[in-house]
Image (cartoon, rainbow, N blue to C red):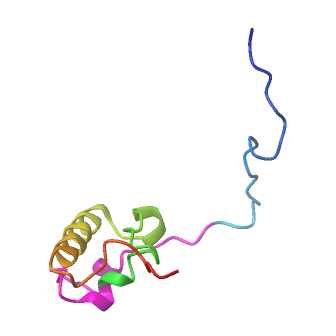
Amino acid sequence: MAAKKNPSAKGRRRRERPDRRPRRLVCHFCKEKIDYIDYKDTALLRRFMSDRGKIRARRVSGTCGRHQRELAVAIKNGRELALLPYTGNQGE
């Protein structure tokens, strides 16, 4: 017995308007010509973390693949040295 498809809004794909294209994200590190992502630069690394302490995805942050990998390593090093949190605010 096959399951019936529910024609709710959840299952539908969102239609793109032909006159509106999403803005192309540009890698911050390529644009600024940054060669090395320093794990001690917490202000920069926090820009690529969510408020809960998660590393933002490439498609959200706009970084290229190479810099996303370097960024993840730098964030993990910063967490290991207690410069960055593993999780977000615990008091809330």
Image location of residue 57, percent across then percent down: 41, 63
Q: From the viewer's perspective, is 6 left or right of 22? A: right
Q: From the viewer's perspective, is 72 left or right of 56? A: left
Q: Is residue 50 above or below residue 1?
A: below
Q: Is residue 36 above or below residue 55?
A: below
Q: Residue at x 82, y 32 (%)?
A: 6
Please name whichever residue, 25 or 83, is drawn nearer the observer in this view of the structure: 83
The tally of labels here is 0
Please name whichever residue, 58 or 51, is drawn nearer the observer in this view of the structure: 51
Residue farthest to the top, as pictured:
1
Please name whichever residue, 88 or 50, is drawn nearer the observer in this view of the structure: 88
Q: Residue at x 25, y 72 (%)?
A: 71
Please name whichever residue, 47 or 18, is drawn nearer the observer in this view of the structure: 47
Q: Residue at x 43, y 78 (%)?
A: 90
Q: Residue at x 75, y 46 (%)?
A: 10
- The residue segment tinted magenta is 22-44
Residue 43 appears in which quarter of the rendering?
bottom left
Image location of residue 82, percent across then percent down: 20, 81
Residue 77 appears in which quarter of the rendering?
bottom left
Q: Is residue 44 above or below residue 9?
A: below
Image location of residue 87, percent across then percent down: 37, 72
Q: From the viewer's perspective, is 45 left or right of 61? A: left
- The magenta stretch spans residue 41: yes
Instruction: Report the magenta stretch's main SS.
Output: loop
- The magenta stretch spans residue 35: yes
Quarter of the image with the N terminus is: top right
Residue farthest to the right, as pictured:
7
